[in-house]
Amino acid sequence: MNKNFLKTLFLVITTGVFAQETNPEESKVKIDVSGYLEAFYGYDFNQPTSPTRLGWIYNHSRHNEFNINIGMLRSTISYENVYANIAIQAGTYVDDNYTAESLKLFHEAYLGVYLDSDKKHVVEAGIMPSYIGFESASTFSNLTLTRSIMAESSPFYFTGVKYKYTPNDSWSLAFITTNGWQRIEKPNNKALPTFGTQVVYTPNEKTTLNWSTFIGDEPVAVDVLRTRYFNDLYVDYAWNDKWKTIAGFDLGYQRNLAGDDFQDWKTITLITQYAISQKWNVAARAEYFEDQENVIVGVGAPFEVFGASFNIDFIPNSKLKLRTEAKWFDSDEPIFTKETGTTTTNFFVATSLAFEF
């Protein structure tokens, strides 16, 4: 834990303390403090010897080790039509997923401005959570403990500007310009800003349909840029009070480094959760990811993986979750590292205890 983290942690906590001492009638500034902490233990039956069990997995990536996946403290400050979110973070997720960034400390750091009194138009700028996908870095809001390959292979965050328009309760539209595909800092200043869109349709309280896009130049070698096109589609449907299903599909294209043709990757994920009671949930997931030319997942061999997992949750109260998951991967190629050699399969079991406040 470095000095910058401690200084920022002190600032966030102090801000929250002062906010609670402020008389709401004497100030229009509102400050809220929230946080999240997730401890975990995982065991990979291939018994890899590397520090991280798989190079393309960024959550719960340690073998036979107790650790913190992510700890986060957030402060939200609002005044009239302006607000700011600042969240600091630490954990193995940060160590693994932010290796290319110098600003690893910030999970979020952005400003927002409502452009009208009805709050239908808003502009946000800074380091923000990704608009792509249905799984976040916080496991509390996900149906399963671990993330799908789909989530691990698409952005968790971006830096840029987002304009969002919410014409009614059923539709939400957004236009985003960023520094790149999961970038805080731009690695190559020759690249133009990337662009994205998001369309969310919620026809009723049971159904959410989402379509997100990305287009922009990505550095694939020193001073070499290639245009990337990406589509993310998913539907989130609650059948009733007990059953919930999410189905997602991603398709991406990128210009080949050696020519003008395109390389592609595609993935599909299906997750179903069943609420046994108020305190117990179970969930099952099936997924498939294909990246034959290693555009996104660089393993040195054609990447074609089928995965399946089973998850059980114990929820003693609304702020605490104890989760256990067993996950199995199968590949045509021997891409999984063992204690000795490689293999085509991987079996992993993880348990986490998460607190959100």
Image (tube, rainbow, N blue to C red):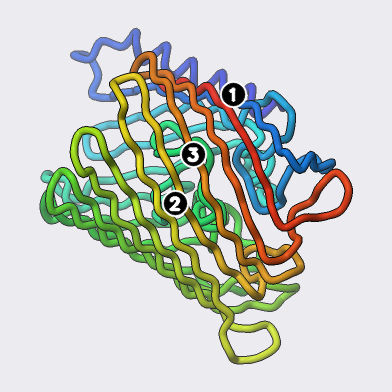
Contact between labelled residues 2 and 1, with CB atoms less than 8 Å apart = no
Residue 110, located in which quarter of the rendered image? top left
Identify the residue shown where x is 25% and y is 19%: 27
Q: How many marks?
A: 3
Question: What x and y, as percent, mark residue 74?
Answer: 45, 28
Q: CA distance from mark 2 to mark 3?
A: 26 Å
Position of residue 238 in the picture relative to residue 21 (left or right): left
In terms of secondary structure, where does tag 2 sit? loop
Question: What x and y, as percent, mark residue 76?
Answer: 37, 29
Question: What x and y, as percent, mark residue 149?
Answer: 55, 54
In terms of secondary structure, where does tag 1 sit? strand
Identify the residue shown where x is 15% and y is 49%: 116
Mark 2 residue type: Ser
Q: CA distance from mark 3 to mark 1?
A: 19 Å
The 10 Å Cα crowd at callout 2, few under 14, some 14 to 19, many 20 or more, is some
Question: What x and y, as percent, mark residue 269?
Answer: 44, 56
Residue 39 tag number:
1
Residue 130 tag number:
2
Identify the residue shown where x is 28% and y is 42%: 244
N-term mark: 1 or 2: 1
Front position among marks 3 and 1: 3
In the picture of the structure, the residue carrying the numbered disc 3 is 310
Identify the residue shown where x is 66% and y is 35%: 92
Front position among marks 2 and 3: 3
Q: CA distance from mark 1 to mark 2?
A: 23 Å
N-term mark: 2 or 3: 2
